[in-house]
Image (spheres, rainbow, N blue to C red):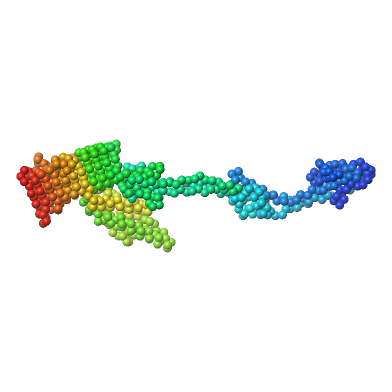
Amino acid sequence: MSEAPATEVPSDLVRLAVVDGSVRVLPGGSGTAEFSWTANVARVTLFGEAVEGASCRVPANANLHVDVRNEAPRNRYLVTISRDRMEATLRVLPEPGINRTLVDAPATHNLRLHVREERIEPDAPTMAAANAELQNAGVAYGLDPERVQAALDAPGEEVVVAVGLDPIEGRNGYLDQLVDFQVMRKVGVLADTPLLRRVRKRDGVAGRDVTDRELAVPIVKDARIRAGAGVTVDDQGIMAIATVDGAPYVDNDGNVEVRHELVLEVVDTVCGDVEFNGSIRVEGDVGEGRRIIARDQLFIEGNVDRAHLESGGSMTVQGSIMSSVLRAGGERAVAATIADRVLELPRALGVVAAQARQMRDSGASRGTDVSHGLSIQLVLERIHRGVLPNIGSMLEDLREAGPAHAPAAERVARWHRMLATSANIGLTIEQYQEIVVEVGALAADVQRATEEPADLVVSYMQASEAEATGTVTLTGKGIFNSRIVAWGGMEADHYEAVFRGGSILSHGRVHVREVGSPAGAKTAVQLAQGAKLEADRAYAGTVVSGPGYTHRFVADRSCVRIDFDSGGSMNVESLAA
């Protein structure tokens, strides 16, 4: 197939050509030539005026100038700051450039401009350029140069390059309660018991966002211990410690106190039994079957009926006492029996704990892990071999002393069991410390019973049992058909006070108006060495005994005086009634 003949261009028209990369208007001709180009590829000026669009008509002898548009290569650095301004990211986008040149074209009255394009890759992105762009975006804090370099090394990937500092909220100081105040208010704490620990405030740390704006934190307050009665605070103001036995109280402002005396209106079935580490005052009566144990003093303003009362210190009952058991200061005989062993036990257990600690530290230095329970057992078996046998013998003495000492015997049995098997049961430091505290309390009770006499003050007692490590004082009619142990003797403050029926064991002076019963009720007075009896009247049937001696009154006698001379012989003086 033959080619179509080329259309001839009239020679009298204006012609345009591209020669050596430039557009030329050929001389001669008339009319105008059509000139067009691709938008944004070239910048065209005609007669010094920029031509808008992508085409124009060029007249003869026109001043036509065409500049191609080249695009320089570059790296774009895109910085994004998160909405909360706590992160900034960087993405590097390389953008190649284009170098354009005009393609030569023969003369024609209708010239379409063609260009040749060459792709030019940008230079490698730089740290300086990236930092400048980050600075322009406002990133001024938390910038990580290594992360910036990672973004430069991975064009196109969005990399977190700056992270703000989160604020750390502070914490108000507070008081950590080391005992259950509500529970211990009913039973009382012992002196030297830690009650509160002050936990200091922890100030917050202000944060900063990536624009270096400070993120403030709230101001926190410190706590404070305000020690009241019965409480002391250590030099650092950190620990509140009870200085007396009693009921602990604390309020929201840090006011803490220990009230040594527990005050009750009555003790009945609603109230239940009461056991308190401190003194107890009952403003009313003690009901039938109730049990009251006060580690210190006990004061009853009302009557006592078929109850059991115990006090570590003195005891006073202002009302009548019927068919009850009273013990002021504990049983001195039992306390004296175990005193030699129990008084040494707290110190011994303290030494055991210290040596067990040394054993664990020594094992740790050699890479051997020795548990607390095992170290305690090894020290008891190898060094302090007498501790466990002493505890065992104390247990036997308490069990032999009767049911009244069952609670104490049970505690001692638990100590023996836990210490003897401390390795097997995994005895903890806390469990060992609990044993030490209980041992210390028993030792204090025993020492008080043997060294600090506790007096008993009663007005009227019938068909009861009572023991006092101090003096029994009668402030009313006296004691009837009861069994009394008075280590400090018996004294009558009331002139009419009598001792009728029952028995009394005294290590001191017994002084009453009458001893014995006109009706012949059996009355026994047992005097220890150095004790004496003084009575205005002793009734027939009254038996007075002492070390190796017994005297029975076969008739009523007055002005009775019985004591022992230096040789231990009993002296009896009396007059006919």
| Residue at 27% in and 54% down | 342
Is residue 281 visible to the viewer in this orientation of the structure?
yes
Q: Position of residue 352 (x, y in %)?
A: 33, 58
Q: Nearer the viewer, residue 327 or 514?
A: 514
| Residue at 63% in and 48% down | 138
Report whether 247 appears left or right of 104.
Answer: left
Residue pushed farthest left? Answer: 576
Q: Is residue 496 above or below residue 339?
A: above
| Residue at 16% in and 50% down | 508
Q: Position of residue 204 (x, y in %)?
A: 50, 48
Report whether 504 appears left or right of 7.
Answer: left
- Give the quadrant of the N terminus: top right
Q: Position of residue 467 (x, y in %)?
A: 20, 46
Is residue 331 visible to the viewer in this orientation of the structure?
no
| Residue at 40% in and 60% down | 361
Residue pushed farthest bottom? Answer: 366
- Give the quadrant of the C terminus: top left
Q: Position of residue 505 (x, y in %)?
A: 16, 48
Tally of marks: 0
Q: Quadrant of residue 341?
A: bottom left
